[in-house]
Image (spheres, rainbow, N blue to C red):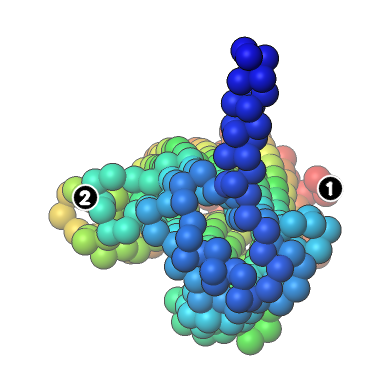
Amino acid sequence: MQPLLSVIALSLLGAHALAGEIIVRDADSLRTALRGLKSGDTLKIAPGDYPGGHHVANVTKLTIEALDPKYPPHFKGGTNGWQFSRCADLTLRNLRVSGQTGNGLNLDDGGDLTSPVTGITLDHLEISDIGPSGNHDGIKCSGLDKLTIRDCTITGWGGQGIDFVGCHHSLITGCRFIGKDGFTASAGIQLKGGTSDVIVEKCHFKNAGERPLNLGGSTGLPFFRPQGTKFEAARLIARDNIIEGSLCAAAFVGVDGAQFSGNTILFPTKWIFRILQETREPGFAPCRNVVVRDNRIVFHRSQVQTEVNVGGGTSPESFRFERNRWFAEDKPQYSKPRLPTVEKEGVYGTDPR
């Protein structure tokens, strides 16, 4: 009897495991599936067009992905394409989202500022045409820790391509941000509201808003995570990215500690960097302690008269510039920048490409 009981037990275990996999082939079956979601489910969605406007809360270890990765399902319209509140260990993979008036994706901690949501992964998502005007983001993240955003493409948005408010210990890697005419993009990536220990690497920004990388920002005090934080952002790393066009390549805004290294900057139209302080509440750290190192910077001197725009309330003397290669393509002899501190081992006037 023992072998037979073992076979029955294994069969029951297999049936239970398979019960967590749900296949959706149309909008009606999607709505039914969302009403019955349980923690640990995997929702596989067939190719086709689906409405946006879905909200999932308090479901953990959930995976939502394309049934066929070569033909991602396309979620069109709605205020938010998808909103996930307190969904720890969520994975979204191979999905398309477009045409929302709010945000493409909204991922948050449900307003519990003391308990971040952990372990979310966003992988191979395509998000486009969000807004088109106003503070409407491709991916909005509030109160998330240990978040990974990998190989996503965001095209056309009103506010930020990716916006972090109070997120920590996270990675954005291999993503593309492409601005579009008619969309009021302010930033490609913005990291603010107490955000810390975030790496942005191997991403490509093309005309991605006024500030492709906004390292810091401006946040109302009630939205900081954790409460009482005295910086917009801290301990950020931006490395090995390509940044084309826009008014500047990167803005350091109320950030307390960052590294900007190994990036390629191509033809910003007004400045190369900005050093700003937009949150000026008592006790807040001034923008400071940034290392800009080993970058390749190509620009037109006819456009860039001021390499680094320095605003009030900042500590530009704490910035370090090291081994950057600067090239004014139209006037190589005028490639050497005017920086707030003396650069170590900079190279000027030689094309670094």
Residue 166 picture location, percent across and down: 36, 51
Tell me if residue 184 can be seen.
no
First along the sequence among labels 1 and 2: 2
Residue bearing mark 1: 353
Question: Residue flagged by tag 2: what amino acid is it?
Answer: Gln
Question: Residue flagged by tag 1: what amino acid is it?
Answer: Arg
Instruction: Residue at the far top: name it.
Output: 2
Residue 145 located left or right of residue 245:
left
Residue bearing mark 2: 227
Q: Distance between the residues labelled 1 and 2?
A: 44 Å
The numbered mark at residue 151 is none
Residue sitting at x 62%, y 12%: 2
Residue sitting at x 26%, y 65%: 220
Picture quarter containing residue 218? bottom left
Residue 117 picture location, percent across and down: 38, 46
Q: Residues within 10 Å of mark 1 (few under 14, many from 20)?
A: few
Residue 206 picture location, percent across and down: 71, 65
Mark 1, mark 2: which one is toward the viewer? 2
Residue 337 picture location, percent across and down: 62, 52
Proximity of marks 1 and 2: CB atoms separated by less than 8 Å: no
Mark 1 falls on what kind of element? loop
